[in-house]
Structures are given as structure tokens and as C-alpha cells.
Amino acid sequence: MIRVAVFDTLKGKGSKKGMLSSEAKRQREIIAYLAVEQDPEFRTRIAIAHALAVKFNTRWQNIYSSIFRDLDEILIPANIIREKGRLPPKRGPRALQHEGVPYYELTQVGMLIASCLDELGEAKVSILRQCIDTIEQDRLREGMLLLLEVAPSLMLRLIREYVMHYSLEIDIMAPITADKVRDVLADSIRSELEFIETFMSLSKDKRSELVNFMHMLSQ
């Protein structure tokens, strides 16, 4: 069984609660990097190693073998990343020149995972929008896009709950369907719906009081 470490946290007396393992940090950075980098020349294994070496304050040669293993043994077999194409190498063995240098992209599963990574900051919203745009069911797609527009933090939290639910069943995470969303998020949605319906029934003063209270708790 392929073990993806993206959400792994350290366990033990000396570990801080919620601290990511080194493997998880590396895999998350690979996914985050491919989520925003568009130039094929910068999406090869060596280019990824150079970028992550800066993040981890090390030499790219020191991290290359780990990235090679993350890609070829974990992230590609798990259908999080796939080979997009091949670039003609500028130098190297003749066989390599014939085959070309592979470069990579995220799959739909990879994009969903990327939308949950804090490493991407505000870019998570545009990444999630791309994921939602691929949904075939019109009502689900339009509803999720509307929620992302009016309450992006809520939509991001719901999609993270969805992704975490399928983190051990990555092969069925995508495509997103209404049945899958309902199975995972029904309880959360009912809570949000209850709040919305109750809020709308309150007087103007009560609504203002509740908004101020929520602002106080969120600061």
C-alpha cells in the first residue's frame, strides 16, 4: 500500500502537537510548488530540487534523492502527480537526449490537496476554483463556486474536511460528486445551514450583536 505523508504529524513526547514530519513537509512543498509553477522547464525533478533546497536551506544535491523517491515511489503512484511531458536536455548521455527530461503536473487529486495547504496562502482560493470548475454536476459546481465567492474561508474548510476524509482513499477523491460531498460533509453543512436560517430570522439588532460577537471571537 502506498503511504502518502502529506498530512502526517510527528508523535511522541518530544514532538509538538500538529508538527509535520520532514517527509510530509517535503511532499507538501512539492505539491505546492507544482500548483503555482507554470513553466515546464521549472517542473523537472532537478528544478523542484533547486526550489525546495532554498525552502529548506540546503544544497539541491542533498535533497534530490528524497524528491526523486517522493515522486517516483509515492506521489506519482498515488495519482497526486503525473508526468506531463518531456523536455529535450541541453546536455547529458545520448540515451537521455533521446528520451528527454520528464516534467510534472498535479492531477485533480493533487489540485484538491494543494487547495488545503497553508504553504500556498491566498493562492488556495484560485486553486480550489480550478478544481470546482471541473465538476460535471451543474448544481453542485455552481453552488460551490457561489459559496467560494461569498465565504471562501468556509468553502476552504469544507474542502479540507473532504480531502482529509479521503486521505487514505486517494483514488476515489476525484472527481467530486454530490454523493461524495453529501457523505462527507452532511453534518457540517447541516450545522452551517442551521446557523444561516437562524441568523436570517433574527431582528436587525440581534444580527448585529451576533456579528460583533463572532468578530470578537475571531480576532
Image: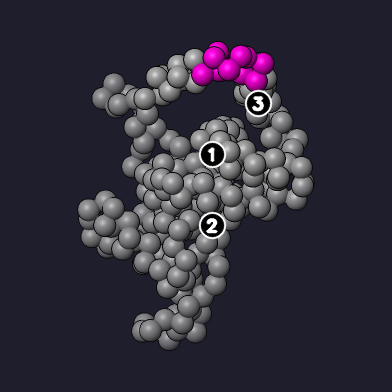
Residue 47 x/y as whole percent: 36, 66
The residue carrying mark 3 is 189
Front residue of 95 and 14:
14
Q: Is residue 29 left or right of residue 197?
A: left
Q: Splitting the image into 4 quarters, where does residue 218 fall?
A: top left
* Magenta segment: 199-208
Q: Marks 1 and 3, Cα distance to the nearest angstrom?
A: 15 Å
Q: Is residue 24 visible?
A: yes
Look at mark 1 in the image and give the residue it sits on.
152
Q: CA distance from mark 2 to mark 3?
A: 28 Å
The numbered dot on residue 141 is none
User: Is the residue under label 3 in contact with that under label 1 (CB below 8 Å)?
Assistant: no
Compare marks 1 and 3 and give the one earlier in the sequence: 1
Protein image colouring: one colour
Identify the residue shown where x is 28% and y is 62%.
60
Residue type, numbered disc 2: Leu
Foreground residue, 30 or 37? 37
In this rendering, is residue 90 above or below 70?
below
Q: Which residue is mark 2?
A: 106
Magenta stretch: dominant secondary structure: helix
Q: Earlier in the sequence, mark 2 or mark 3?
A: 2
Q: Element under label 1?
A: helix
Residue at 46% x, 75% y: name it.
101
Neighbourhood count class around disc 1 (C-alpha, 10 Å): few under 14, some 14–19, many 20 upward: some
Q: CA distance from mark 1 to mark 2?
A: 22 Å
